[in-house]
Amino acid sequence: MKKLKIGVIIAAIIIFVAELFIIDYNSLFSSENLGNYLVMLTMVLLILGQTLPFGKNKKEANN
């Protein structure tokens, strides 16, 4: 299960970086970039959601 979480984190990082190349930097606040921003936000939340349980599992293992 830990390998799957690490794989999801790596995939999310790759997608996040790919979205950085797709953004139209000439008009950052245009509606054309809204989809890119939503994907980037989703990837950040996915990474946080996958990494936060690691700390919880370490605390439970120590007790």
Image: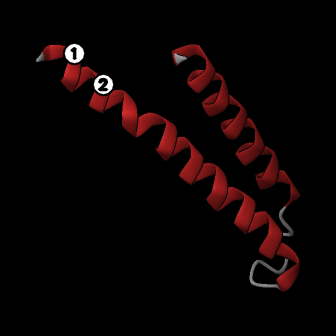
Locate residue 49 relative to residue 56 in the image: left or right: right
Locate residue 4 relative to residue 29 in the image: left or right: left
Residue position marked by numbered label 2 in the rendering:
57
From the image, which quarter does the N terminus lie in? top right
Residue type beneath disc 2: Asn
Q: Quick one: which residue is furthest to the left in this view?
A: 63
Q: Is residue 21 above or below residue 41?
A: above
Of 54 and 41, nearer the camera is: 54
Residue name at image x 55 percent, y 53 percent: 45
Q: How many numbered dots are placed on residues in this image?
A: 2
Q: Is residue 31 above or below residue 13?
A: below
Residue 51: numbered disc: none
Residue name at image x 15 percent, y 15 percent: 62
Residue 4 picture quarter = top right
| Residue 5 at x, y percent in the picture | 57, 26
Residue name at image x 82 percent, y 85 percent: 30
| Residue 34 at x, y percent in the picture | 78, 75
Residue position marked by numbered label 1 in the rendering:
61
